[in-house]
């Protein structure tokens, strides 16, 4: 029997022996913790790169997306950031951001993939 199976059986034994009152108290604590960690939809983003995923009610930024898709080429990461936020950061207009993304993608050809 694996350690995971033993641990699961132990947890089931504990859960089956607990009273309904204890269970409801733990459930209320769990729900309170979720509510405490749920971002306020009306709150402001931490940076100009943050966006709210309304369905999940969570703030993410460009770097979360890059990490999720395992983008390890810095030039591609820079291009994606430019394209996702083209013209919205306040410093450069849409055309300039797109051109810089194209330039970054051209540079990306010089970076071989990093084997992991």
Image: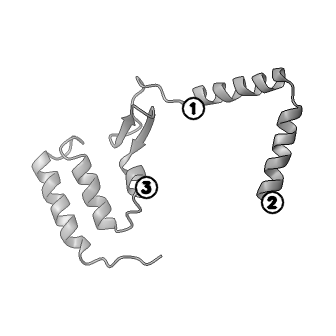
Q: Report the Cα–Cα distance between label 1 and label 2.
A: 31 Å
Is residue 77 depicted above or below 115 in this figure? Answer: above
Kindly indicate whether the residue at mark 2 contacts the one at mark 1 (C-beta within 8 angstroms).
no
Sequence-first disc among 1 and 3: 1
- Rendered view: 114 above or below 21: below
* Residue 17, quarter of picture: top right
Find residue 88 and report its horizontal and vertical position in percent. 22, 40
N-terminal label among 2 and 3? 2
Among the 4 quarters of the image, the one containing residue 69: bottom left
Q: Which mark is residue 37?
A: 1
Q: Quadrant of residue 110?
A: bottom left
Which disc number belongs to residue 3? Answer: 2
Q: Nearer the viewer, residue 20 or 98?
A: 20
- Kindly report the distance in space between the C-alpha atoms of the residues bearing marks 1 and 3: 21 Å
Residue 62 appears left or right of 3 = left
Q: Position of residue 104 (x, y in %)?
A: 22, 65
Identify the element where label 3 is drawn. Answer: helix
Residue at image position (43%, 37%) is: 59
Q: Which is more foreground, mark 1 or mark 3?
A: 3
Q: Position of residue 21 (x, y in %)?
A: 82, 20
Foreground mark, 2 or 3, reads 2
Q: Which residue is mark 3?
A: 68
């Amino acid at each position: 029997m694996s350690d995971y199976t033993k641990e699961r059986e132990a947890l089931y034994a504990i859960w089956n022996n607990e009273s309904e009152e204890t269970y409801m108290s733990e459930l209320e604590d769990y729900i309170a913790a979720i509510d405490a960690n749920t971002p306020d939809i009306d709150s402001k983003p931490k940076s100009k790169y943050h966006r709210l995923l309304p369905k999940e009610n969570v703030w993410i930024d460009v770097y979360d997306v890059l990490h999720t898709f395992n983008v390890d080429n810095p030039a591609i990461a820079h291009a994606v950031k430019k394209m996702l936020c083209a013209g919205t950061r306040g410093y450069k207009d849409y055309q300039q951001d797109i051109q810089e993304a194209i330039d970054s993608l051209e540079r990306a050809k010089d970076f071989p993939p990093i084997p992991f």
